[in-house]
Image: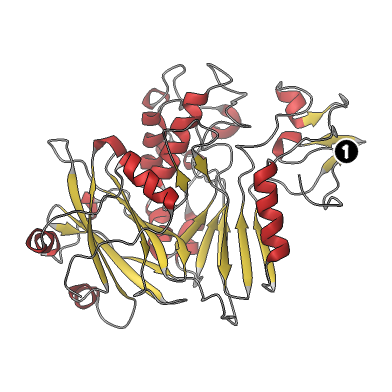
Amino acid sequence: MDRLDEVCISRLGFLKYSLATGVVIWAGAGTAEARELFRTSTVAPELFPQSVASGDPRPDGIVLWTRVRPPRRRGEVRVGYRVAPDDDRSDAAAFRKPLLSGVARTGPDRDYTVKVQLRRPELEPFRSYRYRFYYGGAASRTGRFKTLPAAADSPGRLRFAYVSCQDYTNGYYNALGALARERVDFVVHLGDYIYETVAEESFQGGGPPERRIPPSALGSRRPGEADTLEDYRFLYKKYKTDRNLQRVHENFAFIMTWDDHEFANDSFEVFAPDASGRMRDPERRAAASRAWVEFNPVGVYFDPAKGPLEQIVVYRSFDFGRLATLVMTDERLYRDGPPCGLETRNRYVTPGCGRESAPGRTMLGPLQKEFLLQKITGSRSTWKIWGNEVQFMQTKILNTFLGAERGILPGVPPVPPGGVY
């Protein structure tokens, strides 16, 4: 199919995000201009410094992502993409006759990230595909993804890996390099993709010197602590230059949620208890959310015109035919704060202040709780899987609850009667 396709955007949230930020705008360029973009088979990774990624698979869809090197004259640029079956043909042969082809625009207002959300009948359920981006007279490395099984199907086997808590400064991503060589269908990321600090001893002590990020690289209030959109963008760009992380993204579609460090340690709602500036910081929360959406292959609802608690919905579900249902939740944006105060000791060791088991306390918020319960109880899948980014069970020593901030509401049984909180 040697033509420029128009994308079929089926989710209102992604359309709102596209219109608000311009990350994906399907070009009205003529076929001749589009063909000029694709007139190359030369791979130039330096033009795609964070390589490529895919995520949020569907039986007929996928989200493709890349970031291109900014041009010397910073302005809007066009980026092409192509999708082809992952069959026995060489990349050169496959991309000469792609299954899907299109052009997007990006620019400095989104740091030259590109996101393509596809829902197309050409994509078949539980099939493997390859893709490339085209820019500046060259192509990106080849990425691969697999679509989800059809709703009525029941695959005999499903293989996925999960990862979390990948502080760049603490060591090498050798485990990710090993994962890239595995034969899995999907990768689930449970958060802490980045860490908002680069010189905090409790997190970044003792890592290899070549992995250190100088504190002067970010922070408008305190060196080494991200608190602006530019800071969070810098961290994603830095992390995504790691070749092992790139390989995993190139080989598998990711299904992602966040935890606290994509914003701030021990965060809840718009609060950052460890912040050097304002502890309640809606502007910083909004900046962190926008950077997460810009730099990850996620197709979530996002409307930057709204407030930080309403502008994004991270929780969502994925059905792997009749075999499994995966529910990804967000246990940061809607949760209550620590019951006994924000001091470090009270966050990690609940001292018995009497508010640990107060009625109405929540981690999920009412709407997300209803969503989770409906998906679990209403699913006819054999397996129900919860993509949960925090500790699920209680920790208690000498009748003292530990880890209130780590995800547990003290006084709530591990599997509470009547539901979840």
Question: In front here: 100 or 393?
Answer: 100
Q: Residue at x 37, y 27 (%)?
A: 217
Which image quarter holds the C terminus? top right
Q: Residue at x 69, y 50 (%)?
A: 370
Measured as percent of width and height from the top left, residue 93 is found at 20, 78
Measured as percent of width and height from the top left, residue 330 is found at 61, 45
Callout 1: SS? strand
Question: Quick check: 30 above or below 312?
Answer: below
| Label 1 neighbour load within 10 Å: few <14, some 14-19, many 20+ | few
Report the number of numbered marks. 1
Residue occupying the far right of the picture? 399
Left or right of residue 401: residue 256: left
* Residue named by callout 1: 397
Query: Mark 1 belongs to which amino acid?
Result: Ile
Measured as percent of width and height from the top left, residue 375 is found at 66, 60
Q: Quadrant of residue 119?
A: bottom left
Left or right of residue 227: residue 318: right
Q: Residue at x 9, y 60 (%)?
A: 36
Left or right of residue 304: residue 19: left
Question: In front here: 147 or 207?
Answer: 147
Which image quarter holds the N terminus? bottom left
Q: Residue at x 51, y 75 (%)?
A: 149
Question: In front here: 171 or 286?
Answer: 286
Q: Is residue 225 visible?
A: no
Question: Quick check: 118 above or below 283?
Answer: below
Q: Is residue 54 visible?
A: yes
